[in-house]
Image: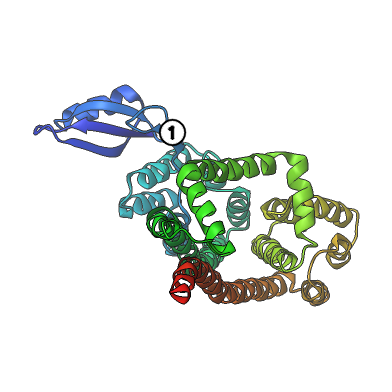
Amino acid sequence: MAAFEYAALDGRGKQKRGVLEADSLRQTRQMLRDQGLVPLNVEPASERKTRSQGGGFSFARRLGALDRVLLTRQLATLVAASMPIEEALQAVAQQSEKQHVRALVMGIRSRVLEGHSLASSLAQYPGSFNDLYRSTVAAGEQSGYLDKVLDNLADYQERQFESRRDVEMAMLYPVVLTLLAFGIVGALMIYVVPDMVGVIENMGQELPTSTRVLIALSEWTQSYWWLLLIAVVLGVAGGRWLLAQPNVRLAWDRQKLGAPFISRITRSSNAARYANTLSILTSSGVPLVEAMNIAGEVVSNKWLQRRLTDATQRVSEGSSLRVALEGVGYFPPMLLHMVASGESSGELDSMLDKVARYQQSEVERIVTTLVRLFEPLMLVVMGGLVMFIVMAILLPILNMNQLV
């Protein structure tokens, strides 16, 4: 039995969408007709691409970060209550208000009913459940502690979601302020300055240098604003294309690990992500070498990924984790000390969790400090630009008054 998504019309001509479990597409359509519905579209529930009504644009329907957190937490609670996994999945699907989430969960349930494990069922949706998630669930199934593993996984995802949300909220104000500043200056240059410049030029006197510069900038902005917009768009697109090239991305990531200010954020954030992933995997019973392979893929810096591959190889050859990570050369000393302590005490997963929390709070502190420094700096820059415009307009008027 599989899950099928459908779109159908009821007796009033209103379109309805939902998910049904059936053996085939034909049976699904017959079930809809038995309910008094006219099937419009029936297809297997999957993590497929959907097309917009306008035409060719398409996008993959995946679980969002918050949806995944809620699903994991609900599943952990139901499994802990000794509910069979297929019933727990059905309950989670029924509680969801989003059609694509319901369809995805029912698709997972249909594979579980066919005899597949939960981890292998999740593998059918790689965009929604990454290697870390699937390996952790597989370890929980093998150890018999799936409820505890899911609970730990939910805690981990909640911390990740909250950290990302806090950084995004901290960046919201300076981004809005920057856009507002450029918008105000652009509006002044296009709509206000030309009228004032026309009055000044009619005075027939020699203009100060600042005024001539302002006139030139205003004329250029009026004539070529579209060129500036195209340059910005092409610059962003070109930068993204360059970073998509493996060699360029590798060189760029290597430079970030040594650049002032950026290196501290890059190292701390990647250390937090690596330690967090390694902690959740080792505490779930995943072997250390396998956990290091998965955790290395979670790291966003490509150069660091390459170095971690070498570290994983050294551990597989018998080296200690502390020595292997020290050979990477980019991890903070505290992480190395905590790993050494965890290895000697037999509490590696606990130590990794503590150092991951510390590194994550360090990243948030650095980002918050930089954001707070950026806000007054942006105000000073904006004030300086407005002052330049005002002085460039007022100087000729003051000079004319002195001549009179």
Residue 149, position as x, y percentages in the image: 57, 62
In the picture, the quarter occupied by the C terminus is bottom left
The residue singled out by tag 1 in the image is 58
Task: Name the residue: 59% across, 62% down.
Answer: 209
Residue most extreme to the left: 12
Q: Secondary structure at mark 1?
A: strand
Q: Quadrant of residue 108?
A: top left
Q: Quadrant of residue 362?
A: bottom right
Q: Which amino acid, mark 1? A: Ser
Q: Is residue 148 above or below residue 218?
A: below
Q: Quadrant of residue 22?
A: top left
Residue 318, position as x, y percentages in the image: 90, 58
- Pick the residue in front: 232 or 288: 232
- Pick the residue in front: 159 or 341: 159
Residue 138 as seen in the image, left or right of residue 20: right
Residue 389, position as x, y percentages in the image: 49, 65
Residue 102, position as x, y percentages in the image: 36, 46
Residue 177 as seen in the image, left or right of residue 255: left
In the picture, the quarter occupied by the N terminus is top left
Residue 375 as seen in the image, left or right of residue 67: right
Q: Is residue 287 above or below residue 341?
A: above
